[in-house]
Image (cartoon, grey):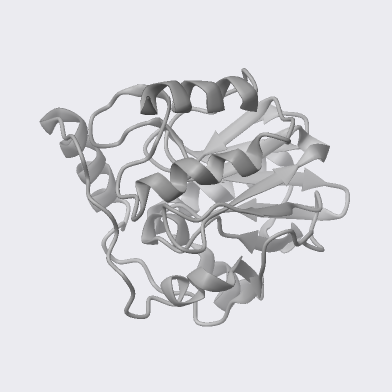
Amino acid sequence: MKLAPSLHRVGNDYVNSYLVDTPDGITVVDAGIPGQWADLTRELDDMGRSLDDIRGVVLTHGDTDHLGYAERLRHDHGVPVYVHELDAGRARREPHQPNGKAGKVRLGATAGFLWYGARHGAFRVPGVAEVTTFTDGATLDLPGSPRVVWVPGHTPGSVVLHVPEVDAVFVGDTMTTRNVLTGVTGPAAAPFTLHPDEALASLDKLSGLTATWVLPGHGAPWNRGLAEALDRIRAAAT
């Protein structure tokens, strides 16, 4: 789905990934789940692009529902995969601290998420055998020049990627616009967060950023600005 010039979404409100399309090639942000490979190739076809135009995959963190087709791109097409150094082990599927608590659950919403995930390979996600790591504040040498803002809490190596060229921040699970376990929509803290208080405090690091598009790993794209999204999350927390 084309969101704006040079900005595309792959997937749906259950699981998202994104494409930043520039004359220098494409940056993929997150890689969803394996069965969304067909969504990726279809979106590239609609753009008049191909897998050969992808220059890199950047992971907002190392959870399995963001790794999806990353290893396939790396192994089969030579696309490098980037992740914060503190989540490199997660991305490789090495033993790590389990995810945080689920929180509230509504049966219908949770069943829909699990059913979609099961049909699209969410429980058979390969680790990324080789990753390129980065740290806080890095500007990656990839199309769109994503700038890394480290926002620990959901996982130790969670990041937000700021890409002014497309007026967007890619927030991964730092926030969500659809809770996959309850179906509740709108900007909010994400479930399965390891350290909720730390995740909330990390949002302060985003206050100086300006972006119209706020693009989560789960839920609809938000185009009413980062500032309003942050205000809503903080208000809910209090």
Residue at 20%, 43% in the rendered image: 115
Tell me, yes or no, if residue 113 can be seen here.
Answer: yes
**Residue 80 position within the rendered picture, expressed as x and y whole percent measured from the top left:** 66, 72
In the current view of this chain or complex, which residue is farthest to the right? 23
On-image quarter of the N terminus: top right
Question: Would residue 44 be found to the left or right of residue 236 on screen?
Answer: right
Residue at 21%, 31% in the rendered image: 109
**Residue 141 position within the rendered picture, expressed as x and y whole percent measured from the top left:** 82, 63
Residue at 88%, 48% in the rendered image: 23
In the current view of this chain or complex, which residue is farthest to the left? 107
On-image quarter of the C terminus: top left
What is the number of callouts on the image? 0
Near-viewer residue (100 or 38) = 100
Question: Would residue 17 be found to the left or right of residue 21 on screen?
Answer: left
Question: Would residue 213 be found to the left or right of residue 67 on screen?
Answer: right
Quadrant of residue 2 within the rendered picture: top right
Residue at 73%, 63% in the rendered image: 52
Q: Check the image and report above or below for 226 versus 10.
A: above
Tell me, yes or no, if residue 43 can be seen here.
Answer: no
**Residue 166 position within the rendered picture, expressed as x and y whole percent measured from the top left:** 77, 35
**Residue 73 position within the rendered picture, expressed as x and y whole percent measured from the top left:** 58, 68
